[in-house]
Image (tube, coloured by chain):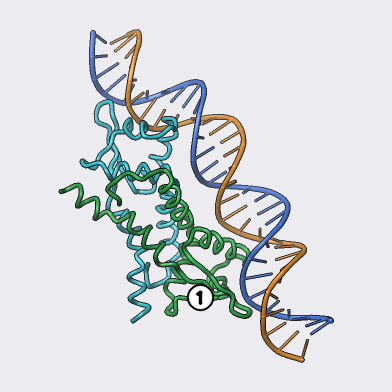
Chain colours: A green, B cyan, C blue, D orange
Amino acid sequence: MVTEALGEETAADLARGFKALGDPVRLRLLSLIAARAGGEVCVCDLTDAFTLTGPTISHHLKVLRKAGLVDCQRRGTWVYYWIIPSRMAALSQLLDTSTITVAATA
Amino acid sequence: MVTEALGEETAADLARGFKALGDPVRLRLLSLIAARAGGEVCVCDLTDAFTLTGPTISHHLKVLRKAGLVDCQRRGTWVYYWIIPSRMAALSQLLDTSTITVAATA
DNA sequence: CCGCTGACTAGACAGCTGTCAAACTAGACG
DNA sequence: CGTCTAGTTTGACAGCTGTCTAGTCAGCGG
């Protein structure tokens, strides 16, 4: 966690990211993509992992994309998704309590 | 990010945490608490930092508490809040892309 | 060109969320 | 006990969200 209080705009941007993470389906989607060795997963593979309909999965992927957490590309018939590590790292760092722990004990 | 796909229950629990983080006001509340040297902040100090009403701040603090991100205690007239670092760390670790990067390149 | 499959968009709808005003509870202080 | 302040709870309401069905678009194979 950051040692200084967040500004309104910064907080709003980061909140968009966390909001996208605040759904079990999207969290599982991300983990499925991240766990894939090549770093890329076809939508059809993702859809198969859930009991939800295609449009619903598509909706969740769109939310993740708009939050800047993943990106995608169409290759022939299939669409592939991958994670954007820098964005993940930015959110992860914000929650890193070691920074504030150091600051608090210093 | 974890190298293995998340189970449904694990994903649901973690999603509850991220969902609580998915609001600018709550994110700023957390940063205000985390930035405080003693690690504890009185509700009145938090309320003063926003243009929102007391009940709204109270509501957001309740959400953070139910998500396991903070805890509170009444001392006399005032109520103090502090962060629960272990919970923050668990969420932070999940987003740590360095793990998967290592796994992917290995 | 026609049909097939994979993926997305549009629209609808129940359920949740953020906000406020009003009412309530817990201590402190005479 | 009475009253003042700090915080929470309740109830209401607009707006957003997750899900589905139905319809649409993009490529591939004949």
Crowding around mark 1 (Cα neighbors within 10 Å: few <14, some 14 to 19, many 20+) is many
Residue A28 x, y percent position in the rendering: 47, 65
For disc 1, the marked residue is A41
Q: In the picture shown, does residue D25 fall above or below B44?
A: below
Residue at 47%, 52% in the rendered image: A16
Q: How many marks?
A: 1
Residue at 43%, 61% in the rendered image: B11
Residue C28 x, y percent position in the rendering: 24, 20
Residue at 60%, 77% in the rendered image: A78
Residue A7 x, y percent position in the rendering: 38, 44
Q: Quadrant of residue B80?
A: top left
For this view, does A52 lie left or right of residue A97?
right
Q: Quadrant of residue B96?
A: bottom left
Relative to the observer, which residue lies in front, A20 or A67?
A67
For this view, does D24 lie left or right of residue A37?
right
Q: In the picture shown, does residue B22 fall above or below B93?
A: above
Relative to the observer, which residue lies in front, C21 or B35?
B35
